[in-house]
Amino acid sequence: MKGITFRLLLVSTFGLFAISGYGQNGWTRAKNGFYAQAVLSTFNTNEYYSTTGTLFNGGSTFRSNALLFYGEYGVTDRFNVLLDAPLLVLNKFSTTEMVAGVGSIKLGAKYRLLKNFPLAAQIDFDIPTDDGFNYATSTEPNSLGTYDQINLPTSDGEFNIWTTLAASHSIASGKTFGSIYGSFNFRTKSFSHQIQAGFEIGQLLWDKLYVIGKFKIQEKIGSGSAGGSFLYGEGTTFSRYNLTLLYKTNEHWKIVGGFSDFIGFPVPRRNLYDGFMFFLGASVEY
């Protein structure tokens, strides 16, 4: 029974990891311009990759649903502030009750480095919303007749600082566009630091529909020594793709939808639950 419980604890980290931010790019909003997006996401799978990259499947299924908010505001034409907030996260296994919480909140700032080319530096402060403990009770007693307590945290309980450099370019009057970026995550409480890199390519079709493909990788730097760190993305690496569709209903509002998933190349999957995440929502822009 201890081995089963340990595995359930280990894989619960994906509840944090499924929450992804808005795409990185080198553009900034005009002074007093803003963008806001709210989506509902859902994730459901029983396939888990261990810290060594071994695939386990079968058994209890992990499920996570979330209400995600993202916003950015132009303080000046070259300086923007950003907010990335999982307002509500619902986590459970098929063998446990559901637990709820607020995910870690990112407060950020972006500065466009060059006036005539979209190259921007960004810093995000990843602020925990709890101590990293949120226990769900099993729905059935174990062989000893007691109910297991399984930690399904919605926040990792530690402060992070993300720094990002991103560049973008567009052609065809802005209808075709792309970005590349690199990020470094400074983690506290003896967690391993992380690096991410990625790109996105987009196309506006029929002046109504944006089709955007994204791809990013994550690697860890060093070996963390934080106690119980397997719960919070310690040693997590991945390659991930995303397809996002934005349909313009009028000048300011869009319907947003899409999905993302992990693949095994070029960076292997480690310490995460593997499967599709679907999302649907709306955005407004002025």
Image: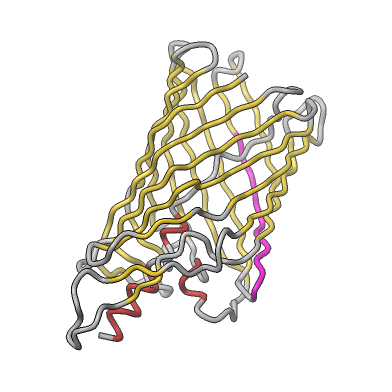
Coloration mode: secondary structure
Against 75, residue 141 (above or below) is below
Quarter of the figure that contains the N terminus:
bottom left
* Quadrant in which residue 271 is drawn: bottom left
Against 133, residue 280 (above or below) is above
- Give me the residue at 32% from left, 59% from top: 98
Region of the chain picked out in magenta, as a range: 179-189
Q: Say which of 171 and 2 sits in front.
A: 2
Quarter of the figure that contains the C terminus:
top right
What is the x, y in percent for residue 169?
A: 65, 28
* Quadrant in which residue 227 is drawn: bottom right
Is 184 a magenta residue? yes
Number of numbered discs visible in the structure rendering:
0
- Give me the residue at 44% from left, 14% from top: 249
Q: Say which of 65 and 137 sits in front.
A: 137
- Give me the residue at 36% from left, 49% from top: 65
| Left or right relative to 84: residue 39 | left
* Quadrant in which residue 95 is drawn: bottom left
